[in-house]
Image (cartoon, rainbow, N blue to C red):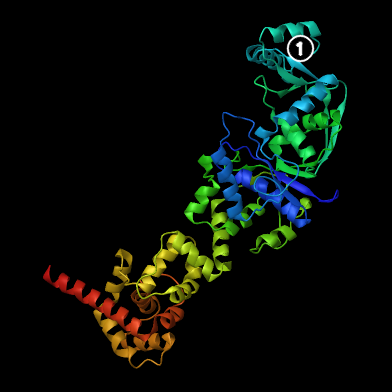
Amino acid sequence: MSESTLKTRFAPSPSGEIHLGNLRTALFNYLLAASRGGVFLLRIEDTDAERSRGEHAQALMRDLRWLGLRWQEGPEADGERGPYYQAQRGAIYARYYQALETAGAAYPCFCSDTALQLARKAQRSAGQPPRYAGTCAHLPAEEVRRRLAAGERPTLRFRVPAGGQVEFNDLVRGPQRYNSDDIGDFIIRRSDGTAAFFFCNAIDDALMAVTHVLRGEDHLSNTPRQLLILQALELDAPAYGHVSLLVGEDASPLSKRHGSLSVRQLREMGYLPTAILNYLARLGHSYGDDSYAEPERLAAQFDLERLGKAPARFDPSQLRHWQKEAVQAADSETLLGWFREAGGVLPAGCDAARGLAVLDLVRDNVEMPQDIVDWVSRLCGEPRPGEAEGRVLLAAGSAFFAASLSLLADSSGAFREFAAAVGKQTGARGKALYMPLRVALSGAVHGPEMGRIWDWLGRDACRERLQAALDYCRGAEAHAETV
């Protein structure tokens, strides 16, 4: 990788399944890298030993691969700046902690959680922003040694320079400025010795040569702290951009109660990867061309200038819209595999070639895998009318289907001419003509164009289905006479 290569990253904590908010962050970083021929890096931030799980990391990588978001650097990929699991980078962090302490830019803090909570409460009561009061900032070295020898386990705090300002140009929100006196000295190493987010996240971005970071706006206030750390260590900082958060209908952060689902759940429900990508790529980013796009085109049209500042509202109906678009764009082999993954089995006598043909026939009427399962059952098997379909057949009556069967032999082969002949002989018109023919031939009250169903079924199958409809009506009519 050359010095000028753009590199983005996705750095999740493996504490659970990846949901739509985190996935959108990953997608934006992936698209930015791909749009400029850059590198997309994956880093697992697993310093929280209590919450991080190896199986979550594996599931996260499986989800990214399924979506097509391939990383060029990180776990299970090439890269010379690893390890890419933060839990394995303790020795690296230790060197930089020592460098900061030696320079006087960090110091041990022995304040208890209780004391800190009381101090924050008092500051809030006085109308002041809660920040560390500097209690341990100037402890004599002898006292520090004594307390360490007594077994006390301090945190390590970064010493924020007084009277300064931190300025940076946010890739999304423009110029930002923070007074250092409003920040307060902050923890960079916990009392158990593990690295705090502010620290290891910034250090790893610098050491892994990350040039651009897109992340949620909830991290905006972290940025001045991280820039101070990198400045103190004379390390290069990436360009940060803070994107709008994903919110529910009530404008609060998206959560399970808004219907937020994990990638695994979406996959198991039958959503196609490109449907999810097309939807999320447009949540907080505008495209001049709002038509369905493969990932390569989504990347080619991705532009930092088109990232919005307003919260992006999650709308399940829009996700379903893109699902329909993805089904339309998928090739028949993909849909057949999708059908089989959902447990669908082609009926006897319906080989793969015929299965592919029926998928092309019904794709306009398909949204989820179960839709294909249902259509294959109707068109390749023996349609069994449900309650609604049965009412349509009975409303037409046995005379209608008897006439249809008698006219089938004289039909020229086109459905339109056959239907016209049936209408002329029975007097049925409009819905009263076409709906019973649709139900008899397709087993459903809606679906593909009838001419296509007619041609796909063929004359023999159409005769069998019209006969079945006639038998159904005669059976029901006979039963009614005996009641």
Left or right of 431 on screen, residue 187: right
Q: From the image, which quarter does the C terminus lie in?
A: bottom left
Is 214 placed above or below 94 here?
below
Dividing the picture into quadrants, the one containing residue 323 is: bottom right
Q: Residue furthest left?
A: 482
Numbered disc 1: secondary structure: loop
Residue name at image x 48 percent, y 53 percent: 269
Residue 99, located in which quarter of the rendered image? top right
Q: Is residue 359 left or right of residue 392?
A: right
What residue sits right under mark 1 in the picture? 136
| Residue 362 can be seen in this image | yes
Relative to 104, say whether 82 is above or below.
below
Residue density around tag 1, few if under 14, some if 14–19, many if 20 or more, within 10 Å: some
Q: Is residue 144 above or below residue 14?
A: above
Quarter holding residue 168: top right
Q: Residue at x 64, y 48 (%)?
A: 76
Pick whichever, 150 or 163, lies toward us: 150
Residue at 36 percent of width and 86 percent of height: 459
Residue 175 higher or lower than 415, as above or below: above
| Amino acid tagged 1 | Cys
Could you tell me residue 84's position as x and y percent? Answer: 69, 40
Point out residue 391 in the picture as x, y percentages from the top left corner: 29, 68
Judging depth in this view, the residue of 264 and 285 nearest the camera is 264
Residue 316: where, in percent of width, then height? 54, 51
Q: Position of residue 83 (x, y in %)?
A: 70, 39
Judge whether residue 307 can be spotted in this image. no
